[in-house]
Amino acid sequence: MNRTREHWTSRMGFILAAAGSAVGLGNVWRFPYVTGENGGGAFLLIYLGIVFSIGVSVLVAELIIGRSTQLDPAGAFRKLAGGAWPIVGYMSILTAFVILSFYCVIAGWTVAYMIKSITGSVLTANPEDIGGVFDAFITDPLEPVLYTALFIGLTVFVALGGVASGIERAARILMPALFVILLVLVARSVTLDGAVEGIAFFLEPDFSKVTWETLLAALGQAFFSLSLGMGAMITYGSYMQRHDDIAGSALAVTVLDALVAVLSGLVILPAVFAFGAAPTAGPGLTFITLPSIFAQMPFGFLFAALFFFLLAIAALTSAVALLEVVIAYFMDEGSANRKKVAVTAGIATFALAVPASLSLGVMSGFTIGGKVLFDALDYLTNNITLPLGGLLVALFLGWVLKHRGEEEFVDGSTLAPALVGAWRFIIRYVAPVAILLILINGLGFI
Ligand code: PHE
Ligand code: NA
């Protein structure tokens, strides 16, 4: 390949782009409801524990694979080890594509809800009816599909700009905006009458609810949230300069991602408790409970529109990262140009997104293992492929690359020499053992 590889313009540019990938629907939409379903404070503690041990270590591992090879996930494994290892890369790319398809469906809902919050059609209904409004919307055969197409179009548009002037530039604009909006919403939520109860639920641990499934939920959420196990961070790492700091940047991205998750919890859970709703509403927490809360609030439509705008921004920078995994693969392996791959991959994504969306409505009779397609894709990726991908990456760094990986770890970082011992220990022993135990028990094999 004689094409010169694109790179981020600076260390800050990489951190913003990688944070843009990490911070997504996983933080704002998924994390609060998974926390609500898993008992609140105890889940938060377990989640943060996993993120700052296994999560950040696997993130570092993926960046090492990308930075050292300057290649897409499949090419990177082939260059470093060959044998069967490229299969891990192929699995990652496939997983990224599958996730992208249903991710864009949910992202489409957020765009729809942003618009509908302003026009009032999701808020004026009697709060009791808002669940019905949501069900009617997502099961409609046409409307959500159109919003999904719109969102995929936006994603492809950003990707067409390339690494520096597309992805990085979008993150430079959107990430600061996201933080400002998030802080406004936190301020609104924690000052509601009765918010204290929600804050207590979120911050006071009750370990009596913790099971193996809780641990698997926390592990899957941590990988999903940090964009791990599906080649995204390998791909973004491949656009780093050869000696860019990995350890420091990984830590910054992890802190930002955790911060946005915690702040999102502080937007949603206090509001839920202040209005006497249940934190266990599941995926509908953001689309049903929250709009019904906004509907009862002065200027609620504004806060609702802001909230769904926040979700849409978070989703866009993440969808761009998922699409980039596919783009990098076809650009590195074939010699297709960015424009051709981005557009083709966008169309392919839409082709899988349509049945995923319809599986919630007209196609709900078609199930896989008792789940409609949409839920099956979510379960398969979050609970199986992501942890498996993370496990294999940890084993690869800890037991195949070994010293070579450690040299990469310290290369370019002033922080890394002090951390290399802890990182080696986690990547060789803690991560593989913990992930295996959680996978086996959480999936009910024992
Ligand atoms: N990390 C994103 C989120 O939390 C999801 C994602 C995964 C994005 C993988 C890109 C790559 O929503
Ligand atoms: Na995230």
Image (cartoon, rainbow, N blue to C red):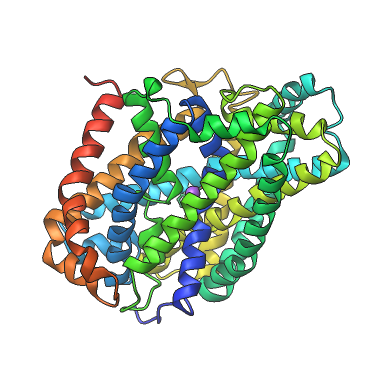
Side (left or right) of 144 relative to 221: right
The answer to whether residue 337 is above or below residue 207 is below
Total marks in image: 0
Residue occupying the point 78% across, 35% down: 294
The answer to whether residue 33 is seen in the rendering is no
Q: Quadrant location of residue 189?
A: top right
Q: Quadrant location of residue 295?
A: top right
- The image shows residue 30 at horizontal and vertical percentages of 53, 38
- The image shows residue 175 at horizontal and vertical percentages of 60, 62
- The image shows residue 126 at horizontal and vertical percentages of 84, 22
- The image shows residue 369 at horizontal and vertical percentages of 41, 20
Residue occupying the point 40% across, 32% down: 217
The answer to whether residue 35 is above or below residue 17 is above
Q: Quadrant location of residue 28?
A: top right
Residue occupying the point 47% across, 31% down: 204
The answer to whether residue 29 is above or below residue 197 is below
Most foreground residue, 173 or 42:
42
The answer to whether residue 412 is above or below residue 446 is below
Side (left or right) of 87 relative to 289: left
The quarter of the rendered structure image containing the C terminus is: top left
The quarter of the rendered structure image containing the N terminus is: bottom left
Most foreground residue, 158 or 211:
211
Side (left or right) of 123 relative to 432: right
Side (left or right) of 376 relative to 147: left
The answer to whether residue 443 is seen in the rendering is yes
Most foreground residue, 127 or 61:
127
Residue occupying the point 58% across, 65% down: 171
